[in-house]
Image: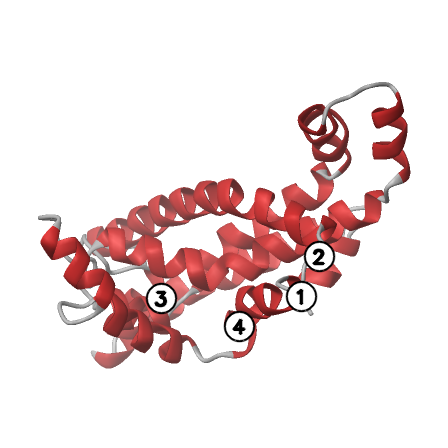
Amino acid sequence: MTLTPTDWATIALTLRLACIVTLLLLLVGIPLAWWLARTHSFLKGPISALVALPLILPPTVIGFYLLLLLGPNGPVGKLMQQLGLDLLPFTFEGLVVASLIYSLPFVVQPIQNAFESIGIRPLEVAATLRASPWERFFYIALPLAKPGILTAAVLGFAHTIGEFGIVLMIGGNIPEETRVISLQIYDHVETLNYSQAHYLSGIMLLFSFVVLLILYSRPNNHSLKYGAN
């Protein structure tokens, strides 16, 4: 039993999606996590709750509301049509947007935990040496939070690869466009091709185990524990 050309195409598409989403999640998640770790604003609670929503909401619920929001009758869909842009549902770009939202807590929470564990003392010492806020962030906070950022990147990448429900709702199941590994496994099962489904599922199982083994084998994995809550 070997992978079919269709299987390889879905693997390539899934890896491309996970790489793009992970990069964007880090660009969005690092400043958001820094703000959540440092702020005393009354907005911290509501925004933290919004970020964490995908942890408890069924993916199909998020996908359903995204479909309404991004569809031709939704506010974002109408705006895109007025700007002459294509609609996002059932496109690769739509998958990227949906995956960003669904994987956001798996990136933000470990990084926020890493920033909070630094404490204020190193930043206060840097401030007494006339380091600007930007210098404190780039030369003190980011290097000290590096383990948490690495954990967040791995979790975001792995979580994006394994998603099914929200991908099906927003992307549909279009070959070489939106069909990722989880959908390919679903297709194999629907056609009673259990042996091929077992082969792909085994690869996903091995991948997930290796990712978790690497994370849990690290000396300090407090950020992983926080992110899994």
The relative height of residue 72 versus residue 81 in the rendered view (above or below) is below
Say left or right for 20 vs 147. Answer: left
Q: Which residue is mark 2?
A: 224
Residue 193: quadrant of the picture: bottom left
Q: Which residue is mark 3?
A: 182
| Disc marking residue 228 | 1
Say left or right for 150 vs 22. Answer: right
Three-letter amino acid code at the position of disc 3: Ser
Tell me how far mark 4 sits from mark 1, CA to CA: 13 Å
Say left or right for 212 vs 168. Answer: right
Q: Residue at (21%, 70%) from the top-left corner?
A: 74
Q: Residue at (27%, 69%) from the top-left corner?
A: 69
The relative height of residue 84 versus residue 73 in the rendered view (above or below) is above
**Structural crowding at the residue carrying mark 3, measured as other residues with C-alpha within 10 Å and reported as few (<14), some (14–19) or many (≥20):** many
Disc nearer the start of the sequence (3/1): 3
> Which tag is nearer the camera, tag 3 or tag 2?
2
Q: Which residue is mark 4?
A: 53
